[in-house]
Image: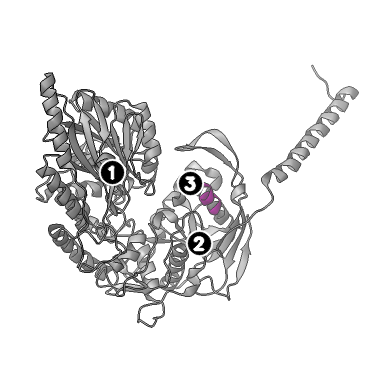
C-alpha cells in the first residue's frame, strides 16, 4: 500500500497575514495588505506523459519511477484545492517544449493533441512555445493547437509567444496565440504574461520556416509596456530561452518581476535566483518535478517577495510513487495509450504490441554521454549500419548520428518484475524524434556517399560546433577516429558566431586519423580490423545518417564553405535530400525502427528476451582523444620560413635596385 505525500500548504497562514494587514491598513486609512498567490510551473515536458523508467512503473506498488501526467494532475489538483479553501489563487504555467520526446508525440500527425489536451484537463493557465514544438512544422503545430482547443476540458489555456513573426495568412496566426495575456486573480491582483523563444532555441527549431523569431529584448520591451498599460501589477515572462538569455533580457528591460524559463534541462533552480528585481525559476524536464513558487505582492510598494522559505514549502515537488494518480487524467491518458499501441503494432509489423512490452535485456544502462563516445551512440549507429545493410543488400561503410537526436539515457528496470529489462516506451523515448516526408513518426534514414576528405571535414565541423553545443557531436559506427580537442581552434575573433560565443578560427587539423572498420557485424569485438582513410582521399564511402543530419549539409555549405560536404549517389553525382531517403516495407525506414529491429535481433538470454552484447558496456575505441604537438610548434617554423622568404626577397630586390635592374620613379 502506497502512502500519500504530505505537501506543505501554507495558505491558511497567508490568509491570517492578509487579515492582519488589512486590519492595520483599515486603521491607517489605506489598503496596504499583501496579496498572496502561488505559481506552479513546469518546462520541457517533451511528451513525457508516463513515469520513467516506465519499465519500473507499477500502479499498485512502490517503485522508483518518476514523473507522469497522472501524478502531475493529482499534485496540481491537491494544491489548487488547498489554496482555494484558503482563498489563495493558483496559476499553472509551462515554459515550452511541450512535445518532442516520447512516442505519444507520434499521435500528433494523426490529428491528436495528447499533451496539451491533458494539460488543459490538469488546469494549466499559460504555456509558451519551445523549439521542439515545431518538430512537425508550423502547419501541424497550428492543427495541434486547434485540436486541443476543441476538447471540452472545462479549463481554458493561453498560448503566449511575443516574438513569433507569423506571415499573414499562415494557419499558425489563426489558432489563438497571444502576444500578451492578463489574468485577474480572485483577490484582484492583475498578472501580465508575455512569452519568448530564445535565440539559441530558435536556431535549433529546424522546422519552423516560414515562421521567424524577432529579437527577444525588443519583443519583451514592447510586451512589458503593453502589459503595464493594461494594468498588470506583476509582469511574468514565460520563456523558452534559458537563464543566460533571460538574464540579459531582464537587465535590458525594466519592469519584469518573474521569468519562468526552460530549454536547458540541467539548469534547475532550487532555490530560484534573483537578479535585480527579477525572480528566475526553472523546474526539471520531463515532468519529473513540479515547481512551486509561493509569492506575496505589496500593492503600495509594488514589491514582490518569495514566501517558500518562511512557510517551509519546497520549491519543487518530486513526482514519485508516493503520489497517487489522478483518476480522470489516468483514464484520459489510457485512451491515448490505446491509440498509440495500435500505431506501434502497425509500424513494427506486429513485433511490438504494447509500449510496455520488454524488448531488451541488459546488465548496464545505455548512457547517452555528452561530448564523447557513448554506449547508446555505439548501439544506435551499429543498428543504422547493420539494419540498412540488411535492408538494401549493400555494405554500409559508416553510420553517424548526432547527440541532439539521442534524448537521454535508456535505463533498465530495477524492480523484481523489470530487473535488467528495457521496454519499448523507454527505448523509443530516447530515439523517436522527428518525422519524415511521408508524415509518419521518426526521422527517416538516408543513404549517401561522401569522399574520405569530406568525412574529415564533417568530423572537424562536428567537433568545432560541439565545443559550443553538444547536440552537434557525432557518434560513429563503421570506423574510428582520433582527435586533439586543443587543436580545434587557432584563436577566436572578438565577434559572435553563436549566442554567447566568439568567432573561432578553426585549425582544420583537430582530427588526427580516420580509419574504416573492415570487419563484419557489430563493431567493438576483439577481431576488429581497420583501414586508414587519408586526408584528401577522394574515394567514395557509403554513409548512412538520418534526415536531421542530412538537413544540415546545405546550411553547412552556405555558412561554412570550407567545410562543404555534398551528399552524392554511388556514382558521385550530387543527390537531393529527398532522393536519399531509404524505403523499406512500402514506407520510409525510420531511425527508431532500425534501432528497435536491431534490439529485437539480438540472441535471447536466459529470460527469453534479446540480450544486449557485453562489448557495448565499454566505450573509447571509436572516438579517441589524443594529445598531438601543439599548433604553436607548427606555426613557429612556418612564421620563421615566411620571415626568411620576405627577407630574401627584400635582399634580392635591394640588390637589383642598386645595380639598376629595377628602376624606381
The secondary element bearing badge 1 is classed as loop
Placement of the N terminus among the 4 image quadrants:
bottom left
The secondary element bearing badge 2 is classed as strand
Of label 1 and label 3, which has the lower sequence position? 1
| Numbered circle sitting on residue 476 | 2
> Where is residue 605 drawn, in percent x and y?
39, 81
Q: With respect to residue 627, does 1 lie above or below?
A: below
> Where is residue 191 drawn, in percent x and y?
19, 33
> For the residues marked 2 and 3, what is the alpha-carbon distance in whole angstroms?
19 Å
Placement of the C terminus among the 4 image quadrants:
top right
Q: Residue at x 65, y 54 (%)?
A: 627
Badge 1 local density, few (<14 within 10 Å), some, or many (20+)? many
Q: What residue does disc 3 label?
A: 556
Q: What residue does disc 1 label?
A: 95
Q: Residue at x 44, y 37 (%)?
A: 499
> For the residues marked 2 and 1, what is the alpha-carbon distance in whole angstroms?
34 Å
> For the residues marked 1 and 3, what is the alpha-carbon distance in whole angstroms?
30 Å
CB-based contact (under 8 Å), mark 2 and mark 3: no
Amino acid at each position: 500500500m502506497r502512502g500519500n505525500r504530505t505537501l506543505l500548504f501554507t495558505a491558511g497562514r497567508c490568509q491570517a497575514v492578509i487579515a492582519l494587514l488589512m486590519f492595520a491598513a483599515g486603521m491607517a486609512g489605506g489598503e496596504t495588505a499583501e496579496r498572496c498567490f502561488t505559481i506552479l510551473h513546469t518546462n520541457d515536458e517533451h511528451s513525457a506523459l508516463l513515469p520513467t523508467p516506465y519499465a519500473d512503473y507499477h500502479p499498485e506498488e512502490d517503485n522508483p519511477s518518476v514523473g507522469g501526467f497522472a501524478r502531475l494532475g493529482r499534485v496540481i489538483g491537491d494544491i489548487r484545492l488547498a489554496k482555494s479553501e484558503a482563498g489563495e489563487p493558483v496559476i499553472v504555467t509551462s515554459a515550452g517544449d511541450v512535445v518532442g520526446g516520447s512516442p505519444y508525440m507520434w499521435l500528433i500527425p494523426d490529428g491528436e493533441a495528447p499533451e496539451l489536451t491533458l494539460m488543459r484537463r490538469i488546469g494549466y493557465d499559460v504555456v509558451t512555445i519551445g523549439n521542439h514544438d515545431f518538430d512537425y512544422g508550423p502547419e501541424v503545430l497550428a492543427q495541434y493547437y486547434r485540436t486541443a482547443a476543441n476538447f471540452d476540458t472545462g479549463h481554458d489555456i493561453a498560448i503566449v509567444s511575443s516574438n513569433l513573426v507569423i506571415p499573414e495568412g499562415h494557419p499558425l496566426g489563426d489558432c489563438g496565440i497571444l502576444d500578451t495575456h492578463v489574468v485577474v486573480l480572485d483577490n484582484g491582483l492583475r498578472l501580465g504574461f508575455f512569452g519568448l523563444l530564445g535565440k539559441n532555441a530558435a536556431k535549433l527549431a529546424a522546422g519552423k520556416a516560414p515562421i521567424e523569431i524577432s529579437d527577444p529584448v525588443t519583443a519583451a520591451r514592447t510586451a512589458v509596456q503593453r502589459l503595464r498599460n493594461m494594468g498588470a501589477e506583476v509582469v511574468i515572462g514565460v520563456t523558452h530561452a534559458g537563464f543566460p538569455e533571460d538574464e540579459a533580457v531582464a537587465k535590458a528591460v525594466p519592469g519584469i518581476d518573474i521569468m519562468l524559463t526552460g530549454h536547458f534541462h540541467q539548469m534547475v533552480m532550487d532555490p530560484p535566483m534573483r537578479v535585480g528585481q527579477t525572480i528566475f525559476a526553472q523546474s526539471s524536464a520531463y515532468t519529473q518535478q513540479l515547481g512551486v513558487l509561493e509569492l506575496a505582492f505589496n500593492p503600495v510598494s509594488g514589491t514582490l517577495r518569495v514566501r517558500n522559505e518562511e512557510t517551509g514549502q519546497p520549491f519543487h515537488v518530486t513526482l514519485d510513487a508516493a503520489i497517487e494518480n489522478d483518476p480522470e487524467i489516468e483514464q484520459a491518458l489510457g485512451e491515448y495509450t490505446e491509440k498509440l499501441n495500435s500505431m506501434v503494432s502497425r509500424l513494427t509489423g506486429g513485433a511490438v504490441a504494447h509500449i510496455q512490452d520488454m524488448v531488451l535485456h541488459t546488465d548496464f544502462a545505455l548512457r547517452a554521454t555528452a561530448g564523447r563516445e557513448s554506449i547508446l551512440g555505439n548501439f544506435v549507429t551499429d543498428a543504422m549500419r547493420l539494419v540498412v545493410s540488411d535492408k538494401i543488400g549493400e555494405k554500409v561503410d559508416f553510420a553517424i548520428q548526432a547527440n541532439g537526436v539521442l534524448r537521454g539515457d535508456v535505463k533498465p528496470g530495477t524492480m523484481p518484475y523489470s530487473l535488467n529489462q528495457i521496454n519499448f516506451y523507454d527505448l523509443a523515448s530516447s530515439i523517436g524524434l522527428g518525422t519524415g516526408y511521408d508524415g509518419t513518426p521518426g526521422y527517416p534514414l538516408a543513404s549517401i556517399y561522401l569522399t574520405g576528405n569530406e568525412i574529415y571535414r564533417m568530423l572537424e565541423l562536428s567537433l568545432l560546433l560541439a565545443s559550443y553545443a553538444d547536440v552537434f557531436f557525432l557518434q560513429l559506427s563503421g570506423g574510428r577516429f582520433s582527435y586533439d580537442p586543443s587543436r580545434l581552434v587557432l584563436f577566436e575573433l572578438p565577434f559572435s558566431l553563436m549566442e554567447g560565443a566568439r568567432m573561432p578560427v578553426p585549425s582544420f587539423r583537430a582530427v588526427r586519423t580516420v580509419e574504416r572498420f573492415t570487419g563484419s557485424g557489430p563493431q567493438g569485438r576483439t577481431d576488429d580490423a581497420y583501414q586508414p582513410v587519408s586526408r584528401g582521399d577522394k574515394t567514395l564511402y557509403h554513409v548512412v545518417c538520418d534526415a536531421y543530419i542530412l538537413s544540415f549539409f546545405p546550411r553547412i555549405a552556405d555558412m561554412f564553405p570550407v567545410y562543404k560536404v555534398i551528399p552524392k549517389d554511388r556514382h558521385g553525382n550530387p543527390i537531393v535530400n529527398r532522393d536519399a531517403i531509404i524505403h523499406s516495407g512500402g514506407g520510409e525506414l525510420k531511425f527508431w525502427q532500425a534501432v528497435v529491429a536491431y534490439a529485437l535481433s539480438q540472441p535471447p538470454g536466459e529470460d527469453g528476451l534479446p540480450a544486449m552484447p557485453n562489448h557495448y558496456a565499454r566505450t573509447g575505441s571509436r572516438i579517441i582523444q589524443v594529445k598531438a604537438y601543439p599548433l604553436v610548434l607548427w606555426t613557429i617554423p612556418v612564421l620563421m620560413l615566411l620571415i626568411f622568404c620576405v627577407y630574401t626577397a627584400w635582399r634580392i630586390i635591394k640588390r637589383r635596385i642598386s645595380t639598376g635592374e629595377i628602376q624606381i620613379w
